[in-house]
Image (cartoon, rainbow, N blue to C red):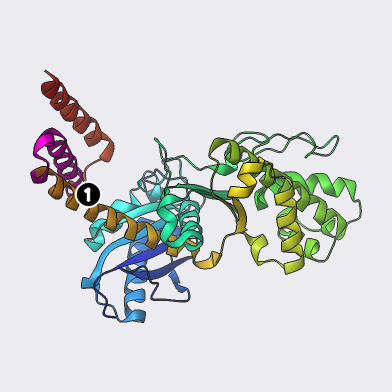
Amino acid sequence: MPVDWVVVGLDNGGTTNNGTILDSSGRFLLDRMAEVPSDVREGPDKAIQSLVVSVEQVLWLTGVPITSVRAVGLDTPGPASGDGVISSKGATNFGHVGWRGFDIRGALAERLGLPVIYNNDGNSAALYAHHVRFGAESGQRSSVAAIVGTGLGGGIIEAGQVIKGAAGMAGELGHVPIPLDGLLDAGQPMPACNCGQSGDAESVASLTGIENNLLPYWLTKYEGHELSGLPIGKAAKLVRKYAEDGDEMALAIFRQQAIALGRLFTIAANFLDPDAYFLGGGVVEAAPHFRDWFFAEVRANTVLREEQARAAEISLVPDLDMAGARGSAVAARDWLIRQGREVKTAGFLSPGRRDDDDHGEAGRLIALVVVAVRAAGRKAGALAVADRVALAGDGQRQGA
Ligand SMILES: [Zn+2]
Protein backbone atom coordinates (compact mmCIF):
# COMPACT_ATOMS: atom_id res chain seq x y z
CA MET A 1 0.00 0.00 0.00
CA PRO A 2 1.55 3.36 -0.92
CA VAL A 3 2.07 5.84 1.92
CA ASP A 4 -0.18 8.91 1.61
CA TRP A 5 0.95 10.62 4.78
CA VAL A 6 2.87 9.77 7.95
CA VAL A 7 3.67 11.21 11.35
CA VAL A 8 6.98 10.84 13.17
CA GLY A 9 7.10 10.10 16.93
CA LEU A 10 10.11 11.17 19.02
CA ASP A 11 10.94 10.21 22.60
CA ASN A 12 13.58 12.55 24.01
CA GLY A 13 15.59 11.06 26.88
CA GLY A 14 18.62 11.98 28.96
CA THR A 15 21.05 10.16 26.65
CA THR A 16 19.14 9.13 23.50
CA ASN A 17 16.27 10.09 21.24
CA ASN A 18 14.12 7.18 20.12
CA GLY A 19 12.17 7.69 16.91
CA THR A 20 9.38 5.92 15.09
CA ILE A 21 7.02 6.50 12.19
CA LEU A 22 3.29 5.85 11.88
CA ASP A 23 1.29 5.96 8.67
CA SER A 24 -2.20 7.34 8.08
CA SER A 25 -3.78 3.90 8.52
CA GLY A 26 -2.28 3.55 12.01
CA ARG A 27 0.54 1.16 11.07
CA PHE A 28 4.04 1.56 12.56
CA LEU A 29 6.65 1.40 9.80
CA LEU A 30 9.50 0.55 12.22
CA ASP A 31 9.43 -2.49 14.49
CA ARG A 32 12.52 -1.60 16.51
CA MET A 33 14.14 1.31 18.25
CA ALA A 34 15.77 3.97 16.09
CA GLU A 35 18.16 5.80 18.40
CA VAL A 36 20.49 8.76 18.18
CA PRO A 37 22.34 10.60 21.00
CA SER A 38 20.02 13.27 22.45
CA ASP A 39 22.74 15.78 23.47
CA VAL A 40 20.35 17.38 26.00
CA ARG A 41 23.19 18.12 28.40
CA GLU A 42 24.75 20.41 25.81
CA GLY A 43 21.76 22.72 25.79
CA PRO A 44 18.84 23.48 23.48
CA ASP A 45 20.74 24.23 20.24
CA LYS A 46 22.49 20.89 20.04
CA ALA A 47 19.48 18.99 21.37
CA ILE A 48 17.07 20.45 18.79
CA GLN A 49 19.55 19.55 16.08
CA SER A 50 19.66 15.98 17.47
CA LEU A 51 15.86 15.78 17.30
CA VAL A 52 16.05 16.81 13.63
CA VAL A 53 18.66 14.08 13.07
CA SER A 54 16.28 11.63 14.71
CA VAL A 55 13.54 12.59 12.21
CA GLU A 56 16.00 12.18 9.34
CA GLN A 57 17.05 8.80 10.66
CA VAL A 58 13.55 7.29 10.72
CA LEU A 59 12.83 8.68 7.25
CA TRP A 60 16.08 7.18 5.97
CA LEU A 61 15.35 3.80 7.60
CA THR A 62 11.88 3.61 6.03
CA GLY A 63 12.56 5.38 2.73
CA VAL A 64 9.66 7.78 3.36
CA PRO A 65 10.19 11.28 1.91
CA ILE A 66 10.02 14.29 4.27
CA THR A 67 7.19 15.69 2.12
CA SER A 68 4.95 12.87 3.41
CA VAL A 69 5.36 13.94 7.06
CA ARG A 70 2.34 15.95 8.26
CA ALA A 71 3.18 16.28 11.95
CA VAL A 72 5.67 15.22 14.61
CA GLY A 73 4.86 13.96 18.09
CA LEU A 74 7.44 14.73 20.79
CA ASP A 75 7.79 13.71 24.40
CA THR A 76 10.35 14.62 27.05
CA PRO A 77 10.65 14.00 30.78
CA GLY A 78 9.12 16.74 32.92
CA PRO A 79 8.59 19.02 34.53
CA ALA A 80 7.32 20.98 31.56
CA SER A 81 4.08 22.74 30.68
CA GLY A 82 1.39 20.89 28.73
CA ASP A 83 2.69 22.63 25.62
CA GLY A 84 6.35 21.71 26.04
CA VAL A 85 7.90 24.65 27.89
CA ILE A 86 10.58 23.24 30.20
CA SER A 87 10.20 24.33 33.82
CA SER A 88 11.90 27.65 34.60
CA LYS A 89 13.39 25.94 37.67
CA GLY A 90 15.14 23.43 35.42
CA ALA A 91 14.62 19.69 35.39
CA THR A 92 16.72 16.58 35.97
CA ASN A 93 17.46 16.02 32.28
CA PHE A 94 17.58 19.69 31.44
CA GLY A 95 20.31 20.97 33.73
CA HIS A 96 21.93 23.27 31.11
CA VAL A 97 20.87 26.82 31.96
CA GLY A 98 19.60 27.39 28.40
CA TRP A 99 16.72 24.99 29.08
CA ARG A 100 15.06 27.11 31.77
CA GLY A 101 11.67 28.15 30.43
CA PHE A 102 12.67 26.91 26.95
CA ASP A 103 9.86 26.04 24.52
CA ILE A 104 11.18 22.77 23.12
CA ARG A 105 7.99 22.07 21.15
CA GLY A 106 7.93 25.49 19.52
CA ALA A 107 11.64 25.38 18.70
CA LEU A 108 11.37 22.00 16.98
CA ALA A 109 8.23 23.07 15.09
CA GLU A 110 10.03 26.15 13.82
CA ARG A 111 13.09 24.17 12.83
CA LEU A 112 11.09 21.51 10.95
CA GLY A 113 8.35 23.76 9.59
CA LEU A 114 5.84 21.16 10.80
CA PRO A 115 3.28 21.00 13.61
CA VAL A 116 4.77 19.38 16.72
CA ILE A 117 2.45 17.82 19.28
CA TYR A 118 3.92 17.63 22.78
CA ASN A 119 3.33 15.30 25.73
CA ASN A 120 5.44 14.40 28.74
CA ASP A 121 6.98 10.93 28.47
CA GLY A 122 4.67 9.33 31.02
CA ASN A 123 1.61 10.58 29.15
CA SER A 124 2.98 9.32 25.83
CA ALA A 125 3.60 5.85 27.23
CA ALA A 126 0.11 5.88 28.76
CA LEU A 127 -1.41 6.82 25.41
CA TYR A 128 0.47 4.04 23.64
CA ALA A 129 -0.63 1.43 26.20
CA HIS A 130 -4.21 2.62 25.77
CA HIS A 131 -4.12 2.34 21.97
CA VAL A 132 -2.45 -1.06 21.98
CA ARG A 133 -5.09 -2.40 24.33
CA PHE A 134 -8.20 -0.80 22.84
CA GLY A 135 -7.33 -0.31 19.18
CA ALA A 136 -10.32 0.94 17.22
CA GLU A 137 -12.28 1.38 20.46
CA SER A 138 -9.67 3.73 21.97
CA GLY A 139 -11.90 6.75 21.53
CA GLN A 140 -14.59 5.21 23.74
CA ARG A 141 -12.31 4.01 26.54
CA SER A 142 -10.45 5.42 29.52
CA SER A 143 -7.33 4.22 31.31
CA VAL A 144 -4.77 5.06 33.95
CA ALA A 145 -1.10 4.09 33.61
CA ALA A 146 1.49 4.04 36.41
CA ILE A 147 5.08 3.61 35.25
CA VAL A 148 7.71 2.91 37.87
CA GLY A 149 11.19 4.22 37.09
CA THR A 150 13.51 6.73 38.74
CA GLY A 151 10.25 8.46 39.64
CA LEU A 152 6.65 7.33 39.23
CA GLY A 153 5.27 8.58 35.92
CA GLY A 154 2.21 7.79 33.93
CA GLY A 155 -0.93 9.42 32.75
CA ILE A 156 -4.68 9.46 32.40
CA ILE A 157 -6.43 8.79 29.11
CA GLU A 158 -10.12 9.66 28.68
CA ALA A 159 -11.98 8.94 25.45
CA GLY A 160 -8.65 8.11 23.83
CA GLN A 161 -7.00 11.42 24.70
CA VAL A 162 -4.38 12.48 27.24
CA ILE A 163 -5.87 14.51 30.09
CA LYS A 164 -3.46 17.44 30.50
CA GLY A 165 -5.32 19.63 32.97
CA ALA A 166 -5.52 23.42 33.30
CA ALA A 167 -1.80 23.86 34.03
CA GLY A 168 -0.56 20.74 32.22
CA MET A 169 -0.23 18.89 35.53
CA ALA A 170 -2.99 16.32 35.34
CA GLY A 171 -2.03 12.68 35.68
CA GLU A 172 0.89 13.31 38.04
CA LEU A 173 0.11 10.02 39.72
CA GLY A 174 3.42 9.92 41.60
CA HIS A 175 2.48 12.90 43.72
CA VAL A 176 -0.91 11.65 44.84
CA PRO A 177 -0.77 11.08 48.61
CA ILE A 178 -1.68 7.52 49.56
CA PRO A 179 -2.88 6.02 52.86
CA LEU A 180 0.10 4.53 54.72
CA ASP A 181 -1.72 2.52 57.41
CA GLY A 182 -0.62 -1.08 57.08
CA LEU A 183 1.92 -0.15 54.41
CA LEU A 184 4.68 1.16 56.63
CA ASP A 185 6.30 -1.07 59.20
CA ALA A 186 5.88 -0.05 62.84
CA GLY A 187 8.51 2.60 63.51
CA GLN A 188 9.37 3.10 59.83
CA PRO A 189 9.98 6.80 59.06
CA MET A 190 7.50 8.66 56.86
CA PRO A 191 8.77 8.42 53.25
CA ALA A 192 9.66 11.78 51.71
CA CYS A 193 9.38 12.75 48.02
CA ASN A 194 11.55 15.13 45.99
CA CYS A 195 8.39 17.18 45.32
CA GLY A 196 8.31 18.20 48.99
CA GLN A 197 5.43 16.00 50.08
CA SER A 198 5.57 13.04 52.43
CA GLY A 199 3.85 9.76 51.80
CA ASP A 200 2.87 10.21 48.17
CA ALA A 201 2.95 7.28 45.73
CA GLU A 202 6.39 8.14 44.30
CA SER A 203 7.98 8.34 47.75
CA VAL A 204 7.43 4.56 47.93
CA ALA A 205 6.95 3.26 44.38
CA SER A 206 10.05 4.48 42.53
CA LEU A 207 13.79 3.86 42.42
CA THR A 208 14.25 7.18 44.21
CA GLY A 209 11.84 5.96 46.89
CA ILE A 210 13.94 2.82 47.38
CA GLU A 211 17.15 4.83 47.61
CA ASN A 212 15.91 7.61 49.88
CA ASN A 213 13.28 5.89 51.99
CA LEU A 214 12.76 2.14 51.80
CA LEU A 215 16.27 0.72 51.56
CA PRO A 216 17.83 2.86 54.33
CA TYR A 217 15.06 1.70 56.68
CA TRP A 218 15.08 -1.97 55.72
CA LEU A 219 18.87 -2.18 56.03
CA THR A 220 18.46 -1.34 59.71
CA LYS A 221 16.17 -4.39 60.03
CA TYR A 222 18.57 -6.69 58.17
CA GLU A 223 21.93 -5.90 59.69
CA GLY A 224 24.86 -7.37 57.80
CA HIS A 225 22.88 -7.62 54.54
CA GLU A 226 25.18 -7.75 51.50
CA LEU A 227 23.75 -4.48 50.19
CA SER A 228 24.67 -2.60 53.36
CA GLY A 229 28.32 -2.43 52.29
CA LEU A 230 27.55 -0.53 49.06
CA PRO A 231 26.87 3.14 48.38
CA ILE A 232 23.10 3.58 48.73
CA GLY A 233 22.51 4.62 45.09
CA LYS A 234 24.25 1.54 43.78
CA ALA A 235 22.55 -0.71 46.32
CA ALA A 236 19.11 0.67 45.41
CA LYS A 237 19.56 -0.35 41.78
CA LEU A 238 20.42 -3.91 42.86
CA VAL A 239 17.32 -4.44 45.01
CA ARG A 240 15.30 -5.79 42.08
CA LYS A 241 17.93 -8.40 41.28
CA TYR A 242 17.88 -9.53 44.90
CA ALA A 243 14.09 -9.70 44.83
CA GLU A 244 14.22 -11.87 41.72
CA ASP A 245 16.52 -14.20 43.67
CA GLY A 246 14.04 -14.38 46.54
CA ASP A 247 15.91 -12.19 49.04
CA GLU A 248 13.62 -11.53 52.01
CA MET A 249 14.53 -7.88 52.52
CA ALA A 250 14.24 -7.04 48.82
CA LEU A 251 10.82 -8.69 48.69
CA ALA A 252 9.69 -6.64 51.70
CA ILE A 253 10.68 -3.49 49.78
CA PHE A 254 8.80 -4.54 46.66
CA ARG A 255 5.78 -5.56 48.71
CA GLN A 256 5.58 -1.99 50.00
CA GLN A 257 5.80 -0.70 46.43
CA ALA A 258 3.02 -3.05 45.33
CA ILE A 259 0.77 -1.90 48.17
CA ALA A 260 1.43 1.74 47.23
CA LEU A 261 0.53 1.07 43.58
CA GLY A 262 -2.60 -0.84 44.54
CA ARG A 263 -3.71 2.04 46.75
CA LEU A 264 -3.00 4.49 43.96
CA PHE A 265 -5.19 2.44 41.60
CA THR A 266 -7.87 2.34 44.28
CA ILE A 267 -7.89 6.15 44.32
CA ALA A 268 -8.09 6.12 40.51
CA ALA A 269 -11.03 3.71 40.69
CA ASN A 270 -13.02 6.11 42.83
CA PHE A 271 -11.95 9.21 40.95
CA LEU A 272 -12.13 8.00 37.33
CA ASP A 273 -13.48 4.46 37.21
CA PRO A 274 -11.35 3.69 34.11
CA ASP A 275 -11.65 0.71 31.76
CA ALA A 276 -8.03 -0.26 32.39
CA TYR A 277 -5.19 0.17 34.89
CA PHE A 278 -1.78 -0.21 33.29
CA LEU A 279 1.41 -0.96 35.20
CA GLY A 280 4.79 -0.33 33.59
CA GLY A 281 8.44 0.11 34.43
CA GLY A 282 11.52 -1.96 35.08
CA VAL A 283 9.52 -4.55 36.96
CA VAL A 284 7.73 -5.51 33.72
CA GLU A 285 11.07 -6.64 32.29
CA ALA A 286 12.03 -8.54 35.46
CA ALA A 287 12.19 -12.34 35.72
CA PRO A 288 8.68 -13.74 35.05
CA HIS A 289 8.20 -15.39 38.46
CA PHE A 290 9.01 -12.13 40.24
CA ARG A 291 7.01 -9.97 37.81
CA ASP A 292 3.96 -12.21 38.28
CA TRP A 293 4.29 -12.11 42.05
CA PHE A 294 4.60 -8.30 42.04
CA PHE A 295 1.67 -7.90 39.68
CA ALA A 296 -0.48 -10.17 41.87
CA GLU A 297 0.43 -8.07 44.92
CA VAL A 298 -0.62 -4.88 43.12
CA ARG A 299 -3.93 -6.49 42.14
CA ALA A 300 -4.53 -7.74 45.67
CA ASN A 301 -4.13 -4.19 46.97
CA THR A 302 -6.36 -2.58 44.35
CA VAL A 303 -9.84 -2.34 45.83
CA LEU A 304 -12.48 -2.30 43.12
CA ARG A 305 -16.23 -2.50 43.59
CA GLU A 306 -17.80 -5.65 42.19
CA GLU A 307 -19.15 -3.81 39.14
CA GLN A 308 -15.77 -2.23 38.51
CA ALA A 309 -13.92 -5.52 38.81
CA ARG A 310 -16.22 -6.95 36.13
CA ALA A 311 -15.84 -3.95 33.83
CA ALA A 312 -12.13 -3.13 34.19
CA GLU A 313 -8.78 -4.86 33.92
CA ILE A 314 -5.30 -4.41 35.34
CA SER A 315 -2.49 -5.16 32.90
CA LEU A 316 1.11 -4.46 31.97
CA VAL A 317 2.31 -1.70 29.62
CA PRO A 318 3.70 -3.37 26.47
CA ASP A 319 6.92 -2.57 24.52
CA LEU A 320 8.04 -0.11 27.14
CA ASP A 321 11.27 0.81 25.35
CA MET A 322 9.29 2.07 22.38
CA ALA A 323 6.16 3.25 24.22
CA GLY A 324 7.26 6.90 24.44
CA ALA A 325 8.08 7.33 20.75
CA ARG A 326 5.05 5.31 19.67
CA GLY A 327 2.70 7.18 21.99
CA SER A 328 4.07 10.47 20.64
CA ALA A 329 3.31 9.29 17.10
CA VAL A 330 -0.21 8.26 18.12
CA ALA A 331 -0.77 11.71 19.65
CA ALA A 332 0.37 13.42 16.45
CA ARG A 333 -1.83 11.22 14.26
CA ASP A 334 -4.86 11.75 16.52
CA TRP A 335 -4.28 15.49 16.44
CA LEU A 336 -4.15 15.53 12.63
CA ILE A 337 -7.31 13.45 12.36
CA ARG A 338 -9.12 15.74 14.81
CA GLN A 339 -8.02 18.81 12.85
CA GLY A 340 -9.40 17.27 9.66
CA ARG A 341 -12.66 16.38 11.37
CA GLU A 342 -13.15 19.87 12.83
CA VAL A 343 -12.64 21.55 9.48
CA LYS A 344 -14.93 19.06 7.72
CA THR A 345 -17.65 19.29 10.37
CA ALA A 346 -17.62 23.07 10.26
CA GLY A 347 -17.76 23.16 6.48
CA PHE A 348 -20.60 20.68 6.47
CA LEU A 349 -22.69 22.33 9.16
CA SER A 350 -22.79 25.94 8.13
CA PRO A 351 -24.51 25.76 4.74
CA GLY A 352 -26.65 22.68 5.45
CA ARG A 353 -28.75 23.51 8.50
CA ARG A 354 -31.03 26.37 7.53
CA ASP A 355 -33.11 26.12 10.72
CA ASP A 356 -30.04 26.39 12.89
CA ASP A 357 -27.74 28.92 11.27
CA ASP A 358 -26.35 30.32 14.51
CA HIS A 359 -24.93 26.98 15.62
CA GLY A 360 -23.42 26.41 12.23
CA GLU A 361 -21.78 29.81 12.31
CA ALA A 362 -20.44 29.27 15.79
CA GLY A 363 -18.96 25.92 14.75
CA ARG A 364 -17.28 27.49 11.76
CA LEU A 365 -15.95 30.33 13.84
CA ILE A 366 -14.39 28.01 16.41
CA ALA A 367 -12.65 26.00 13.70
CA LEU A 368 -11.23 29.11 12.07
CA VAL A 369 -9.99 30.48 15.37
CA VAL A 370 -8.23 27.21 16.23
CA VAL A 371 -6.41 27.16 12.90
CA ALA A 372 -5.44 30.81 13.22
CA VAL A 373 -3.98 30.33 16.71
CA ARG A 374 -1.77 27.46 15.59
CA ALA A 375 -0.68 29.14 12.40
CA ALA A 376 0.31 32.30 14.21
CA GLY A 377 2.20 30.29 16.85
CA ARG A 378 1.18 32.69 19.55
CA LYS A 379 0.65 31.83 23.17
CA ALA A 380 -2.41 29.58 23.32
CA GLY A 381 -3.55 30.84 26.72
CA ALA A 382 -3.68 34.49 25.73
CA LEU A 383 -5.67 33.80 22.59
CA ALA A 384 -8.06 31.46 24.29
CA VAL A 385 -9.15 34.32 26.53
CA ALA A 386 -9.74 36.57 23.52
CA ASP A 387 -11.74 33.85 21.75
CA ARG A 388 -14.00 33.36 24.71
CA VAL A 389 -14.78 37.07 24.89
CA ALA A 390 -15.62 37.17 21.19
CA LEU A 391 -17.85 34.12 21.40
CA ALA A 392 -19.63 35.31 24.53
CA GLY A 393 -20.32 38.61 22.81
CA ASP A 394 -21.75 36.72 19.87
CA GLY A 395 -24.01 34.72 22.15
CA GLN A 396 -25.39 37.83 23.84
CA ARG A 397 -26.16 39.40 20.49
CA GLN A 398 -27.95 36.29 19.37
CA GLY A 399 -29.92 36.14 22.57
CA ALA A 400 -31.04 39.79 22.41
ZN1 LIG B 1 5.93 13.68 45.18
**Magenta segment:** 351-375
Q: Using a 10 Å C-alpha cutoff, classify the residue at mark 1 as few (fewer than 14 neighbours), some (14 to 19) or many (20 or more).
A: some
Picture layout, residue 35 above or below residue 391: below
Residue 311 is situated, as x and y percent measured from the top left of the image, at 58, 48
Q: Residue 358 placed where, x, y %?
A: 12, 33
Q: Which residue is mark 1?
A: 342
Numbered marks: total: 1
Q: Is residue 139 visible?
A: yes
Q: Answer yes or no: is residue 150 visible.
A: no
Q: Residue at x 61, y 37 (%)?
A: 267
**Where residue 142 appears, x then y in whole percent?**
48, 48
Q: Nearer the viewer, residue 60 or 2?
A: 2
Q: Position of residue 393 (x, y in %)?
A: 15, 24
Quarter that holds the N terminus: bottom left
- Report whether 40 appears left or right of 346: right
Quadrant containing the C terminus is top left
The residue depicted at 27 percent of the width and 76 percent of the height is: 3
| Residue at x-position 49% and y-position 63% | 132
Q: Is residue 374 magenta?
A: yes
Q: Amino acid at mark 1?
A: Glu
Place residue 30 in its image quadrant: bottom left
